[in-house]
Image (spheres, helix red, strand yellow):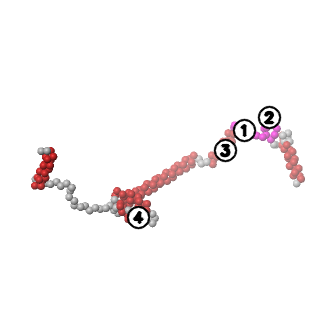
Amino acid sequence: MADELNNNNQQQDSGTNSATDPQQGTQSQSPDAQGNNAGSEKTFTQEDVNNIVSQRLEQEKKKMPSKEELEAFKKWQEDQKTAEEKRAEKDAEYNQMQAELNLYKNKEKVTKAGINPEFAEFAVFEVSKQVNDSTDFDTALTSWIEANPQYKVTQEEPEDKPPAIVIPQANTEKVKEMNQIMNNIIRGKRGN
């Protein structure tokens, strides 16, 4: 153990003397002719830097896929994306068409149930708010009609009413009498 300590001390002593002993194989710590501390930093020429950069670029390029592979991947990704977009568009269009079909079916149900056609869309809207998992449209419609009878069409029976103005036929006694009365009234007002 004592021998090891002596060897370490000798190595430290030889390390401090390395500036004066060029045969030790370590870098010199003495300043060069220009006053720079040559041993503390290694300087690179532009050619050395270019070589290092190109080597690192080559290493990174090896990690990356080739242009052909990258283009193929991007094309595949686009193909997948457009297929998904097309599917999403078709699904949206299908859902919209289903909603329209249900709207028309429900309007027909509402008008057949006796609701005034002017209020059919309103009735469909109101009844649709009541539809859920346990209540279908028909059940909700009947309960809505019971709660809102004012929207039902009231069928009035046509009565045989005479027209408001009666035009007598010409050349009858009544017509002649009426004409005479009217003439007298008109002449009387004129002062004749």
In the depicted view, which residue is nearer to us: 120 or 38? 120
Q: Position of residue 13 (x, y in %)?
A: 87, 45
Q: Are marks 2 and 1 in contact (CB under 8 Å)?
A: no
Along the horizontal axis of the image, is 154 left or right of 6? left
Is residue 100 in view?
yes
Q: Is residue 30 magenta?
A: yes
Q: Which mark is residue 55?
A: none
In the depicted view, which residue is nearer to us: 68 or 189? 189
Residue under the image location 43 percent in, 54 percent down: 93
Residue at numbered disc 1: 44
Residue at numbered disc 3: 56
Ranked by sequence position, the earlier of labels 3 and 4 is 3
Residue at numbered disc 2: 35
How far apart, in angstroms, are the residues tagged by discs 1 and 4?
87 Å
In the depicted view, which residue is nearer to us: 105 or 14? 105
Tag 4, which secondary structure? helix
Q: Position of residue 164 (x, y in %)?
A: 21, 55
How far apart, in angstroms, are the residues tagged by discs 3 and 2?
34 Å
Tag 3, which secondary structure? helix
- In the image, the segment drawn in magenta is 27-47
Q: Is residue 36 magenta?
A: yes
Residue under the image location 41 percent in, 61 percent down: 127
- Is the residue marked by circle 4 packed among few (<14), some (14-19), or many (20+) residues within 10 Å? some
Q: Quadrant of residue 94?
A: bottom left
Tag 2, which secondary structure? loop
Residue at numbered disc 4: 140
